[in-house]
Image (cartoon, rainbow, N blue to C red):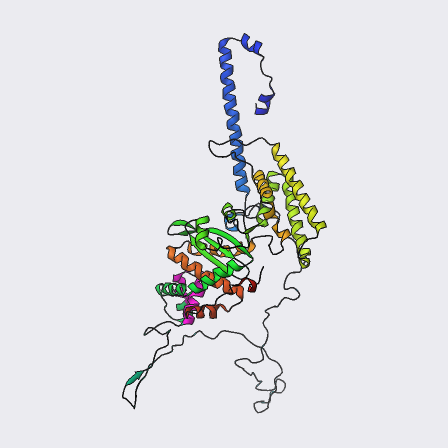
């Protein structure tokens, strides 16, 4: 007998109940109490099962979980968030390809002449030939380390007899040392491609036949960290002067404890910092968000909203994934409508990019549909029974209701991309920049010391920014090792915006 059957049994009237023997009345009261307790327990277990099923059903395509959490098993089939572009595979019109092409001035020329006639066999050694075809092979010469010896001379002045000595270059400080390009290559492979010190040492031994120890690689990092301090100061000023920035954070093991790597980035620059805390304390210490006055694009994590001097824009890719989960797993129809509406709004913005604003006749229907869908969602949840209340804390809500509250309370932040075309639809830039930190974690596992985490973040900030700026990575590192890192523009009017 299930709970529905029990609830359909009519209750005993007072007269019938009072006419029963006292022992039977006591027995019925005990049964009623037991049934009530069991119904409460069944409801709690049903809620628990629903929560566990929802947790299992969540993956990177329908929630904010990272792709790395999906594991090796094939995730449940869900509709991709990507839309068909209608373009054929491969390079598009106007794309500057990098197809290998012959050059006019090769470094070496090898001529292959016939020794004899292929018809009659007559010798052709004395016959002058003419070039009829050519092919070029691009290759790398065998790596070889060049050693430059610096000598200083002493000269005796013929006038006063004083001995004067020459001076070593400022960057030559030891009897034997590695040059700037080897140091730059060490930093490049470690912080761009995340080679651990032991493998980095092995790479130099295998390729260049030089024995750079892991300790030497660590010393190179420490010196480079100190010389990049002026770059970091300018980088912060550059980011603070930008119109729009992306913010994100991710966990990272450091000193056997959970730390957090925070990033502030744009299309032209990237800043990383590591801290023991995830929230406002870490953000204040990074000293970008407290002084930033532009548009901050991020997920809906509450501490970001504590900075009220900035204009907030929310990542709608997060919303699309959550809406997908609520529609496909919870069967809530309003979620499908809201997802379609957000995608429609994004497409309309793309169509009107040249106008820099949506026409009123396009904007108004989207706003009205947004309000209507929210009302439909709230009405749906008002008809559902409340979830069991826990012993402590606020009344628990369903995932759909939580998302509805956010979409209503942060409406302007959700739709910011419609009103200001400089605000992107997603926080993909921040997520792409923070994804490299997860790759570092997969390879190295953790930072052994807090100082090691700080060194990595500063050097990685320089490399990521150099790539975005189009600088030559190797030359930029050489300049930094020599004490002259490249610096960024810090005046708002001169910074290209998103």
**234 with respect to 126 (left or right):** left
Q: Magenta stretch: residue 196 in it?
A: yes
- In the picture, the quarter occupied by the N terminus is top right
Can you say which quadrant of the picture contains the C terminus?
bottom right
Instruction: Determine the residue located farthest toward the bottom in the rendered image.
Output: 126
Residue 466 to residue 153: above or below = above
| Left or right of residue 151, residue 333 in this image | right
Span shown in magenta? 180-203
Any part of residue 197 in sight? yes
**400 left or right of 306 in image:** right
Out of 18 and 48, give the one closest to the viewer.
18
Q: Mainly helix, strand or loop, the magenta region?
A: helix
Q: Is residue 2 visible?
A: no
Observer-nearest of 318 and 61: 318
x and y, in percent, of residue 16 in the image: 57, 10
Q: How far from the left and from the top, in percent, is residue 72?
A: 51, 49
- Residue, x 61% and y 56% (percent of image)? 422
Residue 194 falls in which quadrant of the image? bottom left
Quarter of the view holding residue 325: top right
Q: Is residue 490 above or below residue 61?
A: below
Marker count (numbered): 0
Is 106 in front, or is 157? 157
Q: Is residue 407 magenta?
A: no
Look at the picture and state if 381 lies above or below 436.
Answer: above
Q: Position of residue 252 (x, y in %)?
A: 43, 52
Q: Residue furthest left?
A: 161
Q: Is residue 374 left or right of residue 304?
A: right
């Amino acid at each position: 007998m299930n709970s529905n059957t029990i609830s359909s049994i009519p209750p005993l009237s007072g007269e019938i109940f009072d006419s029963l023997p006292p022992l039977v009345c006591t027995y019925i009261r005990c049964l009623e109490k037991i049934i009530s307790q069991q119904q409460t327990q069944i409801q709690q277990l049903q809620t628990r099962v629903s929560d566990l099923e929802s947790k299992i059903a969540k993956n990177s395509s329908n929630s904010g979980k990272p792709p790395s959490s999906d594991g090796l098993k094939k995730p449940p089939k869900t509709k991709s968030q990507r839309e068909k572009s209608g373009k054929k595979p491969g390079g598009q019109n106007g794309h500057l390809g990098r197809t290998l092409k012959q050059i006019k001035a090769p470094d070496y020329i090898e001529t292959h002449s016939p020794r004899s006639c292929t018809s009659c066999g007559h010798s052709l050694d004395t016959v002058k030939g003419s070039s009829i075809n050519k092919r070029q092979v691009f290759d790398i010469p065998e790596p070889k380390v060049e050693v430059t010896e610096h000598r200083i001379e002493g000269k005796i002045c013929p006038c006063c007899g004083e001995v004067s000595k020459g001076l070593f270059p400022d960057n030559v400080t030891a009897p034997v040392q590695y040059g700037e390009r080897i140091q730059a290559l060490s930093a490049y492979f470690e912080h761009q491609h995340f080679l651990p010190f032991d493998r980095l040492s092995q790479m130099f031994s295998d390729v260049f036949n030089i024995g750079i120890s892991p300790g030497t690689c660590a010393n190179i990092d420490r010196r480079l960290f100190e010389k990049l301090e002026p770059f970091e100061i300018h980088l912060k000023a550059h980011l603070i002067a930008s119109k729009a920035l992306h913010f994100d954070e991710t966990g990272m093991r450091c000193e056997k404890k959970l730390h957090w790597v925070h990033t502030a980035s744009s299309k032209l620059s990237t800043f990383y910092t590591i801290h023991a805390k995830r929230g406002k304390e870490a953000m204040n210490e990074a000293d970008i968000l407290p002084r930033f006055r532009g548009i901050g694009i991020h997920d809906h994590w509450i501490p970001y909203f504590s900075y009220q001097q900035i204009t907030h824009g929310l990542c709608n890719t997060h919303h699309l994934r959550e809406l997908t989960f609520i529609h496909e797993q919870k069967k809530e129809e309003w979620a499908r409508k809201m997802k379609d509406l957000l995608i429609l709004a994004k497409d309309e913005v793309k169509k009107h990019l040249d106008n820099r604003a949506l026409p009123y006749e396009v904007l108004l229907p989207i706003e009205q549909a947004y309000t209507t869908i929210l009302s439909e969602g709230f009405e749906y949840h008002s008809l559902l029974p409340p979830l069991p209340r826990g012993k402590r804390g606020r009344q628990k809500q369903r995932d759909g209701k939580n998302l509805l509250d956010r979409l209503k309370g942060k409406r302007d932040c959700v739709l910011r991309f419609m009103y200001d075309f400089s605000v992107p639809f997603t926080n993909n830039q921040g997520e792409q920049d923070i994804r490299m930190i997860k790759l570092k974690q997969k390879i190295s596992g953790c930072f052994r010391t807090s100082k090691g985490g700080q060194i990595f973040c500063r050097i990685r900030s320089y490399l990521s920014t150099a790539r975005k700026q189009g600088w030559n990575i190797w030359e930029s590192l050489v300049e930094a090792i020599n004490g002259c890192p490249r610096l960024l523009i810090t005046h708002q009017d001169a910074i290209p915006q998103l």
